[in-house]
Image (cartoon, helix red, strand yellow):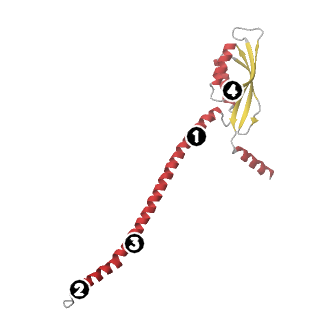
Amino acid sequence: MKNWPWYSYIILVIVVFGLTFFLYFKPQNAELQRIRADRLKVEAEVAKLQEQKKELDKIEAELATLTEELRDLEKIIPVKKEIDVILRRIQQMAFDSRLDIIRFTPRGEINREFYSEWPIAIEIRGNYHNLAAFFDRLSKFDRLFNIENFGLKALSGQTEETTISSNFTAKTYMFVEEAAAPQAGQNETRQAR
């Protein structure tokens, strides 16, 4: 090598750098570019997942709010009749209003699209102010009630506590679950087999 001309050293250095570049640095650069591209894809996927997480959190919060609203609405329009609960509550309201319940007659349900009406014929005796207090208490009851066919008459043989009699229909409502209807159809199909 000592006898080589000076430019041959330059050529040797260029060849060594060229081989190093093509055999080592170029593959490493390609690998680096691939890793960067993978990183960008992963970062884009992470950003997309973070957006989906935000949407999911928003939906979960909305679901919790709607579930709470449903619980509140189920107090007003429950899924089941609860005859004993309603009878006890109405009796308690009448007692608190110093009224006597003469008749409490639940009638059959009237089915509507997504709810059922449940009329209850009631006859009460007492005085006018106590009847007004009873209706005030009934209006504050958790369940929804409509008063229909209201009638009022004076009693013969009145006492201070009992001067009037009132007949009316207290109509309450129940939510009809959609799942109950298909299950009933399935049971009928099974019985037919």
- How crowded is the residue under tag 4: few (<14 C-alpha within 10 Å), some, or many (20+)? some
Q: Residue 103 vs residue 10: left or right?
A: right
Residue nearest the viewer, comparing 39 with 15: 15
Residue receiving disc 1? 66
Q: CA distance from mark 3 to mark 4?
A: 82 Å
Residue nearest the viewer, comparing 149 with 11: 11
Where's residue 9, x and y in %? 23, 85
Q: Residue 162 vs residue 30: left or right?
A: right
Q: For the residues carrying marks 2 and 1, which lies nearer the camera in this image?
A: 2
**Mark 3 residue element:** helix
Q: Quadrant of residue 106?
A: top right
Residue receiving disc 3? 30
Compared with residue 14, is residue 171 higher up or lower down, i.e. above or below?
Answer: above
Where's residue 108, x and y in %? 77, 33
Residue receiving disc 4? 87
**Mark 4 residue element:** helix
Q: CA distance from mark 1 to mark 3?
A: 53 Å
How many numbered marks, from 0 up? 4
Compared with residue 172, is residue 25 higher up or lower down, i.e. above or below?
Answer: below
Q: Residue 191 vs residue 127: left or right?
A: right
Q: For the residues carrying marks 4 and 1, which lies nearer the camera in this image?
A: 1
Q: Label 3 amino acid?
A: Ala
Residue 7's label in the rendered image is: 2
| Earlier residue among tags 4 and 1 | 1
Q: CA distance from mark 2 to mark 1?
A: 84 Å
Q: For the residues carrying marks 3 and 4, which lies nearer the camera in this image?
A: 3
Q: For the residues carrying marks 2 and 4, which lies nearer the camera in this image?
A: 2
Q: Residue at x 70, y 33 (%)?
A: 173
| Earlier residue among tags 2 and 1 | 2
Compared with residue 38, is residue 155 higher up or lower down, i.e. above or below?
Answer: above
Q: Label 2 amino acid?
A: Tyr
